[in-house]
Image: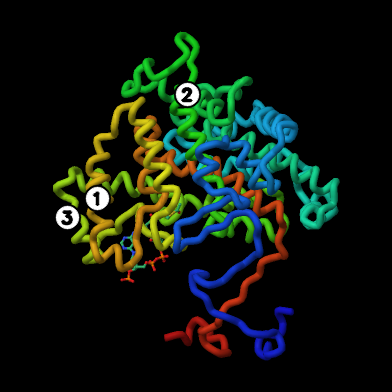
Amino acid sequence: PNDRPEDESERGLRVSDRGFLNTAVIESSITYIDGDNGILRYRGYPIEQLAAKSSFLECAYLLIYGSLPTRAQLSYFEPEVLNHGVMHADAAGFFRAFRYDAHPMAILTSAFAYLGSYYREANPSLQGQNIYTNGAKGDPAALQNMDKQIFRLIGKATTLAAMAYRVRQGREFVVPPTGMSYTESFLFQLDHLSHSDAFPTALTSGGATYRPHPVLVRALDILFILHADHEMNASSTTVLQTGSSLPDPYSAIAAGCASLYGPLHGGANEAVIRMLVSIRSPENVPEFLAAVKRREKVLSGFGHRVYKTSDPRSFIIRKVADEVFAVTGADPLLNTAMALHDAALKDDYFVSRKLAPNVDFWSGLIYRAMGFPMDFFPVLFVVPRVVGWLAHWRQGVKIWRPRQIYVGPSERPYVPLEERQ
Ligand code: ACO
């Protein structure tokens, strides 16, 4: 109990591990990372094979339920997710209440919490039963309830993201279409390429009826696969931390969304673009790297808490970038990016610190080429990561209540205001 702060010798060892460098908070069978050898697997399957052969929703099933779906399982799961994409008409008012220039992550974070207010059966405190701990123990009714929230959250993630996108443009919302895959439906709802001066209708593949370009659909599907999970990163631990006190999962996902917003996590690919814009051209790369070594700048898109070699996703993404550029035209920043990448990988300063490109080094360039504004990049990370968050959430955790090492003053008497120096 908390009323015994002094003598805790019988409570075992307390370790101080700033930044959780060496603390494993759960045992998990979802995602495996070998940071020294650049290996990433979902449920045992190498990320390279999944990116080449799988679809995003198939990977979602794999991450959440532990095995690749059979045809029957997929033909149940996919429509369950896609049919849950439709939002209540009232939601339009919620989105329109934001300022015209609100950051889409602020809108999306709030939208997930707002979504939870619709579903009483998802709220353990209203249900009077511990639906989520029972679910983690395998209780079928509780699991069914959890699955319903999972279908809803994955299905509505694209809809909420598209609404956050369109409301800032003052455009009507789009009801999710039928007959399209998850990523095609998302691009359809955004419908940004057909309305951008920079991307003429030649990029659309459906003539009079807009249909997202199949190459861009597949590229986004692969990017979603790569971003679906990455074990105990900042946002996933936030979801587990929040979920551990048993709020509805919409609130836990909103918390994860807020964590991902930060520039050291989901904001890194935006930082890469800003960095490349500031470098301007390949001949300025040496000067920029010198500034990094003087610690005046950060080489965004390089370095990772776990990978001490290249992030395996960065190779896949580099290939996707070429496929996207073949459709959209190469990004003018590409040459600078390649010069920076090659120079850093040959430089002792970065090599000795085991700093190599992470997934974000290239992803921003792809999103930019596809016409997304920079502040939408973290949203494109959240949508697929909802799957990983839910996979971890479904496993359940005991309430997380970490301890601290107190280093403040010992007891001292209260000093009245007039006596304070
Ligand atoms: N640029 C310059 N130097 C760096 C960078 C970088 N990107 N990353 C690490 N270093 C240096 C550190 O200054 C430190 O040097 P020192 O030992 O001389 O003091 C050394 O490399 C070790 O780095 P740490 O900070 O200890 O590594 P940590 O694991 O704490 O940080 C992080 C990881 C936050 C990702 C860091 O590498 C970084 O800030 N990278 C840039 C941001 C980024 O790309 N984030 C995306 C991560 S991937 C994702 O979220 C999907």
Crowd class of label 3 (few under 14; some 14 to 19; many from 20; radius 10 Å)? some
What kind of residue is marked 1? Leu
Q: Is residue 17 visible?
A: yes
What kind of residue is marked 3? Pro
Label 1, label 2: how far apart the Cα atoms are: 31 Å
Label 2, label 3: how far apart the Cα atoms are: 39 Å
Which residue is at a point 61% across and 82% down the rendered structure image?
Answer: 14
Quarter of the image holding residue 82? Answer: top right
Q: Which of pointers 1 and 2 lies earlier in the amino acid sequence?
A: 2
SS label for mark 1 = helix
> Residue 365: x, y in percent?
34, 39
Residue under label 1, please give it.
340
Residue lying farthest left? 283
Q: Which of pointers 1 and 3 lies earlier in the amino acid sequence?
A: 3
User: Is the CB atom of the residue marked by disc 1 within 8 angstroms of ligand 1's nearest atom?
Assistant: no
Judging depth in this view, the residue of 321 and 70 nearest the camera is 70
Which residue is at a point 67% across and 53% down the rendered structure image?
Answer: 393
Residue 214: numbered disc = 2
> Residue 216: x, y in percent?
44, 28
Q: Along the horizontal axis of the image, is 73 left or right of 322?
A: right
Which residue is at a point 75% across and 39% down the rendered structure image?
Answer: 148
Quarter of the image holding residue 100? Answer: top left
Q: Is residue 96 visible?
A: no
Q: Which of pointers 2 and 3 lies earlier in the amino acid sequence?
A: 2
Label 1, label 3: how far apart the Cα atoms are: 8 Å
Residue under label 3, please give it.
286
SS label for mark 2 = helix
